[in-house]
Image (cartoon, rainbow, N blue to C red):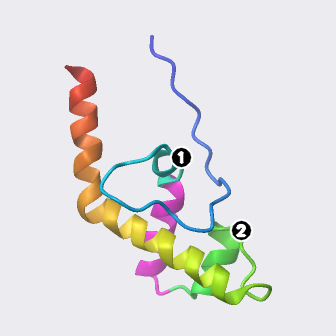
Amino acid sequence: MTMRVPVELDPDVDDIAPTGDEITTYDERHFVTYMRLLDAKAEDADWKEVAQIVLHRDPSFEELRTYRCWQSHLERAQWLSREGYKRILEQAAANKA
């Protein structure tokens, strides 16, 4: 029997999401956040509302900082959906070997 780490469904986020070609621990912790951002983008949701609900940021308090946070996390989510998922699959295959 393997132990599974509980997934936090609504974690707080850093000001800026990770960049680069490696899946980070931060990314793993925020997979649900990234999916929620992609869903909101697909529905053309207002970024300010998404920032409040998903990222726990108040754009009326610090609009530019909140926008950068939203934008960096959305870009990371998009990268994961385009390319990063391949790394996840590679890591899973390596762990089975």
Rendered-image quadrant of the N terminus: top left
Residue for point 43% across, 47% down: 24
Nearest the eye: 60 or 65: 65
Distance of label 1 from label 2 (alpha carbons): 16 Å
Q: Which residue is mark 1?
A: 29
Is the residue 70 above or below the residue 2 in the image?
Answer: below
Is the residue 53 above or below the residue 43 in the image?
Answer: above
User: Who comes first in sequence, dot 1 or dot 2?
Assistant: 1
* Three-letter code for the amino acid on which mark 2 is drawn: His
Q: Quadrant of residue 92?
A: top left
Task: Give yes or no for contact between labels 1 and 2 (Cβ–Cβ under 8 Å).
Answer: no
- Queried whether the magenta region covers residue 13, the answer comes back as no
Q: Secondary structure at mark 1?
A: helix
Q: Residue 29's spot in the image, x, y percent? A: 53, 46
* Three-letter code for the amino acid on which mark 1 is drawn: Arg
Residue for point 62% across, 61% down: 14
Q: Residue 34's spot in the image, x, y percent? A: 47, 62
Q: Which residue is mark 2?
A: 56
Residue for point 61% across, 50% down: 9
Residue range of the region highlighted in magenta in the rendering: 32-44
